[in-house]
Image (cartoon, rainbow, N blue to C red):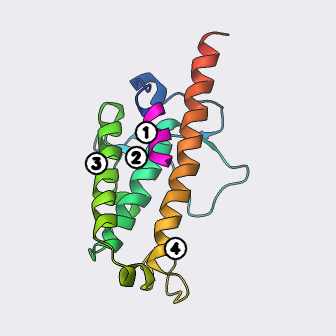
Amino acid sequence: MTWSLFEFHLAELVPEDFRWEPAEHCWTVRRGADGGWEPDFAEVEPDPIPVPTIAWTTWHIGWWWTVTLDHAQGRPPRERTEVRWPGADAAVDWLRGLRDEWSAVLDRLTDADLDAPAPFPWQDDPDKTVAHMVAWVNGELMKNVAEIGQLRLLRAASAHA
């Protein structure tokens, strides 16, 4: 259900939507010294919290989903700085690819797998299971989809004001 709602917005996104800054105080992605995109980030969440752009939010989805997939498949998890935003022209395909990879992981899970301790996002909490991790992915995705949808709608509305 969450992905179906996301597809509605993904189908309507245009490259100009991604880096539109909805407020002066926002987080986005910026060109780094190597020409790649680097997200704004702070280890401790700032106060006030910056409003993210669609670019930043799509990077954020890519980051947490990539790391979750690494954990779920027994791979060494990538560092935040290793997960690069691919740019507006490739972001939608990147996210769809992560969704496809996640669906394949879900298809392989057994009841025993779901009851196993979760490798992520909780560190060393034996009470959290893979089923909790699966629910966390859906919750995190739902939150980010709502943010992207709202940003897309606000940008479209502001163009007609």
- Which mark lies nearer to you, 2 or 3? 3
Please identify the residue farthest to the right as the structure is shown.
Answer: 48
Which span is picked out in magenta? 1-8
Q: Residues within 10 Å of mark 2 (few under 14, many from 20)?
A: some
Whole-number angstrom distance, CA of label 2 to CA of label 3: 21 Å
Is 129 or 46 nearer to us in this picture? 129
Report helix, strand or loop for mark 1.
strand
Q: Tell me if residue 129 is in the magenta stretch.
A: no
Image quarter of residue 7: top left
Query: Which residue sits at x=39%, y=25%?
Result: 15
Whole-number angstrom distance, CA of label 4 to CA of label 3: 23 Å
Report helix, strand or loop for mark 4.
helix
Give the labeled residue for mark 1.
Answer: 30
Q: Which mark is residue 97?
A: 3
Give the labeled residue for mark 2.
Answer: 38
Reply above or below: 70 against 62: below
Whole-number angstrom distance, CA of label 1 to CA of label 4: 34 Å
Q: Which mark is residue 132?
A: 4
Q: Is residue 33 visible?
A: no
> From the image, which quarter does the C terminus lie in?
top right
Query: Which residue sits at x=40%, y=61%?
Result: 80
